[in-house]
Amino acid sequence: MRMTRERRGVMKVTIVIPNYNGKHFMEECMAALDGQLCRDFEVLVVDNGSKDGSVAYMKERYPEVRLIALDTNTGFSGAVNIGIRESKTPYVLLLNNDTKVDPAFVGEMIKAIEVDNRIFSVSSRMIQMYHPEYIDDAGDMFNLIGWAYQRGVGHPVEEYEKPYDVFSACAGAALYRRDVFEKIGLFDEMHFAYLEDIDVGYRARIAGYRNVFCPSAKVLHVGSGTSGSKYNEFKVKLAARNSIYLVYKNMPFLQLIVNFLPLVLGWLLKYQFFKKQGFAQAFKDGIKEGIRTRKNCKKVPFRFSNLGHYIRIEWEMITSLFLYAWEYFRRKI
């Protein structure tokens, strides 16, 4: 790669790539980074105890790239937290290994975050690798019934060409302002994987920061490159458990009471969906584990100074439910 370690002192961005048995993705991912027009970055790969020879491959093929090799799989949250702690740059860009970024990607992400110092994160325009006419993720949203969803998924790419605020950035290809992590905390390692990016974006929103979508930062994404499939028992159980953590941690007691019925409705609807997919037991086990272990989470302390932010979040969760329905039915037509 053209980027060398000697330039680290002047970098703006540290690109953190978590890897778990993803050696087959790394060549295309690294080649795209090597073709960036903006060179103001360094690359840090955090390997999560891979068994496929990823570490040896990276050392041999990309000796100029910084590599941290862990003995065990610490999950997405654990790996990226290590990368964030090791970074010294103003911004940290998290990037999945099953991606191929556009040549202007890094530069566009930097321009987007520097528009406003209250922007915590920037979500890129993620495009389906094997169906590049469709969006994979145009920013993550969270609605009143407790569902997190990818905005724009399955819709034509050209429909998402304008920037807008989102609930949180999708951490598969997102830029973060590093010093804000010192105020709101890093990714929650209790999550291990799934919804951890919604959680950190939620905490940033409570503190008054923005998360935005940058359509000019384009990236092709395979999707489920580590878990291997869209739905499986591991993924369904963790996502169900983490959905409990998400609302318990971030909603004050009064807000939990107000939203209790919509949230229960959301979990019941999800249960029916996963029952049809053959994952009813995994979903139930995840919900039960979330309820049983929720108090181990670090709950966001309520502050009256953030009351306006809570009200704004509540309103956005309501409107986001209608946005979800609108996008869903448009996709089905």
Image (cartoon, rainbow, N blue to C red):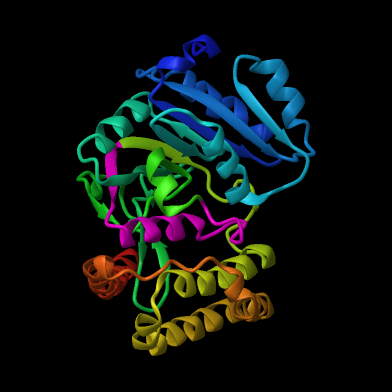
Estimate the x, y position of residue 261 in percent, counting from the top left: 40, 90
135 relative to 173, above or below: below
Q: For the magenta stretch, what is the residue range?
A: 187-216
107 relative to 241, above or below: above
Question: In this rendering, would 148 be left or right of 1?
Answer: left
Closer to the camera in the image, 207 or 25: 207
Q: Determine if residue 58 is in view.
A: yes
Closer to the camera in the image, 228 or 177: 177
Q: Is residue 225 magenta?
A: no
Closer to the camera in the image, 107 or 187: 187
Q: Quadrant of residue 155?
A: bottom left
Estimate the x, y position of residue 235 in percent, counting from the top left: 62, 63
Q: Is residue 214 magenta?
A: yes
Residue visible at 76% across and 24% down?
A: 56
Estimate the x, y position of residue 183 in percent, counting from the top left: 40, 50
317 relative to 99, above or below: below
Residue visible at 35% across and 19% down?
A: 38
Number of callouts: 0
Q: Quadrant of the C terminus?
A: bottom left
Q: Determine if residue 177 is in view.
A: no
Q: Quadrant of the N terminus?
A: top right
Estimate the x, y position of residue 130 in percent, counting from the top left: 49, 42
Residue visible at 41% across and 28% down?
A: 13
Residue visible at 28% across and 74% down?
A: 314
277 relative to 227, above or below: below
Question: In this rendering, would 156 be left or right of 18?
Answer: left
